Image (tube, rainbow, N blue to C red):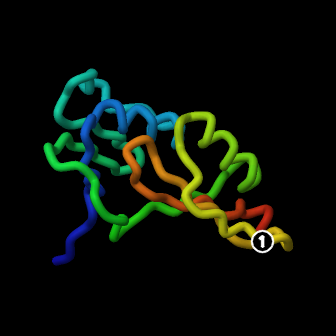
């Protein structure tokens, strides 16, 4: 018998608020039962569960998400995410078009934006 990962759980100061940001990033809805102020919020399609905890984020993430745009370029996706409230943490994009951008969500959780499949020649 084996196990499967049901959810990736992300600690947050405001579970609903942070889940709402990621819902817009991924274009996937929050669970129908989730409401502002709830201690948990779920994006079921992505397997992301956000929980409110009292501790603040204090160090770099040990695990992070890598995003690959599906219908736009990496740079267009970075601009879209910045407009949604992300911040640019580290720009690893190179002049030849390779590389990635490290962003942070509104609570400071780092994630990367890679090149789209088209940009990779896939």
> Residue 118 is drawn in which quadrant?
bottom right
In terms of secondary structure, where does tag 1 sit? loop
The residue furthest right is 96
- Residues 66 and 60: in front is 60
- Residues 30 and 79: in front is 79
**Residue pointed to by mark 1:** 94
| 20 horizontally vs 49: left or right | right
Residue 88, x across and y down, in percent: 59, 52
Q: Residue at x 42, y 64 (%)?
A: 64
- Residues 57 and 49: in front is 57
The C terminus, quarter of image: bottom right
The residue furthest bottom is 1
Q: Residue at x 59, y 63 (%)?
A: 90
Residue 19, x across and y down, in percent: 36, 37
Q: Residue at x 71, y 56 (%)?
A: 74
The residue furthest front is 58
Residue 99, x across and y down, in percent: 70, 71
Residue 72, x across and y down, in percent: 75, 48
110 relative to 120, above or below:
above
């Amino acid at each position: 018998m084996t196990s499967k990962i049901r959810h990736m759980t992300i600690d947050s100061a405001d579970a609903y608020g942070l889940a709402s940001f990621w819902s817009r990033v991924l274009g996937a809805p929050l669970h129908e039962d989730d409401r502002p102020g709830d201690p948990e919020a779920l994006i079921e399609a992505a397997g992301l569960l956000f929980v409110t905890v009292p501790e603040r984020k204090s160090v770099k993430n040990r695990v992070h998400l890598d995003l690959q745009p599906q219908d736009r370029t990496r740079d267009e996706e970075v601009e879209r995410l910045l407009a949604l409230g992300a911040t640019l943490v580290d720009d690893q994009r190179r002049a030849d078009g390779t590389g990635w951008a490290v962003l942070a969500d509104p609570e400071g959780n780092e994630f990367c934006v890679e090149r789209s499949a088209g940009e990779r020649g896939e």
